[in-house]
Image (tube, rainbow, N blue to C red):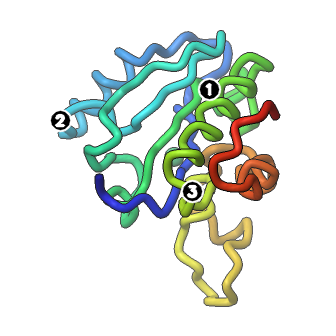
Amino acid sequence: MRPINYIILHCSGTRASRNFSGDDIDRCHRLRGFSRAGYHYYVRKNGTIEKMRPEDMPGAHCYGHNKDSIGVCYEGGLDENGHPGDTRTPAQKRSLREIVRALKQDYPQAKIVGHRDLSPDLNRNGIIEPHERLKECPCFDATDEYADVELLPQGYSGNL
Ligand SMILES: [Zn+2]
């Protein structure tokens, strides 16, 4: 298995009012020239987790970090007016936490981050500030949200 340094959260960038399936993602990414969907996992609004590509295959979801990361995407990220927003349903939040926790078990050294947190640090102060973000994806603070998962001792399998 390749080294995994990051678990990267994404949103599909589609309106929460719209249904956008794993097949839709797959089709869009193939049109962009990828061999298949760029993410490893996709979480639908109803909480269903779709496996998109094998974990041992590098992703196509985050420039500069595809080789050393696993990409997890949720359906949505835009409100009904097309503005970026945390549109996750309670079922999506539960499933995202479940998959992030499982990945953290398998890759304990991996840092949990959002796509936007890997934007270039333009003023090199060590912090990716909002004005430096290339885009808002995944529209919530992944590091903050999964801070408790990040702190779990290796091998811990209790409920969160
Ligand atoms: Zn993204």
Above/below status of 147 relative to 160:
below
Three-letter amino acid code of the residue under disc 3:
Pro
Residue lying farthest to the bottom in this orientation: 124
Question: Distance of mark 3 from mark 1, alpha carbons?
Answer: 28 Å
**Mark 2 closeness class: few <14, some 14–19, many ≥20 residues within 10 Å:** few
What number is the disc on residue 108?
3
Using the image as rendered, state which of residue 46 and residue 34 is in the foreground: 46
Circle 1 is placed at which residue position?
76
Q: Residue at x 73, y 16 (%)?
A: 91
Circle 2 is placed at which residue position?
35
Label 3 vs 1, first from the N-terminus = 1
Which mark is in front, 3 or 1? 3
Above/below status of 66 relative to 53:
below
Q: Where is residue 83 in the image (x, y as percent from the top left)?
A: 70, 36
In-image side of 114 versus 151 (left or right): left
The quadrant in which residue 14 appears is top right
Ligand 1 neighbours mark 2 (CB distance < 8 Å): no
Using the image as rendered, state which of residue 154 and residue 107 is in the foreground: 154
Label 2 vs 1, first from the N-terminus = 2
Q: Which residue is drawn at 31% across and 32% down?
A: 53
Q: Position of residue 144 (x, y in %)?
A: 80, 55
The quadrant in which residue 159 appears is top right
Asked whether the residues under the numbered discs 3 and 1 touch, taking CB atoms below 8 Å apart as contact, a structural biologist would say: no
Question: Distance of mark 2 from mark 1, alpha carbons?
Answer: 23 Å
Question: Distance of mark 2 from mark 3, alpha carbons?
Answer: 28 Å
User: Judging from the image, what secondary structure is the residue with disc 1 in?
Assistant: loop
In-image side of 37 versus 78 (left or right): left
User: Judging from the image, what secondary structure is the residue with disc 3 in?
Assistant: loop
Three-letter amino acid code of the residue under disc 1:
Gly
Above/below status of 26 relative to 32:
above
Asked whether the residues under the numbered discs 2 and 1 touch, taking CB atoms below 8 Å apart as contact, a structural biologist would say: no
Using the image as rendered, state which of residue 71 and residue 110 is in the foreground: 110
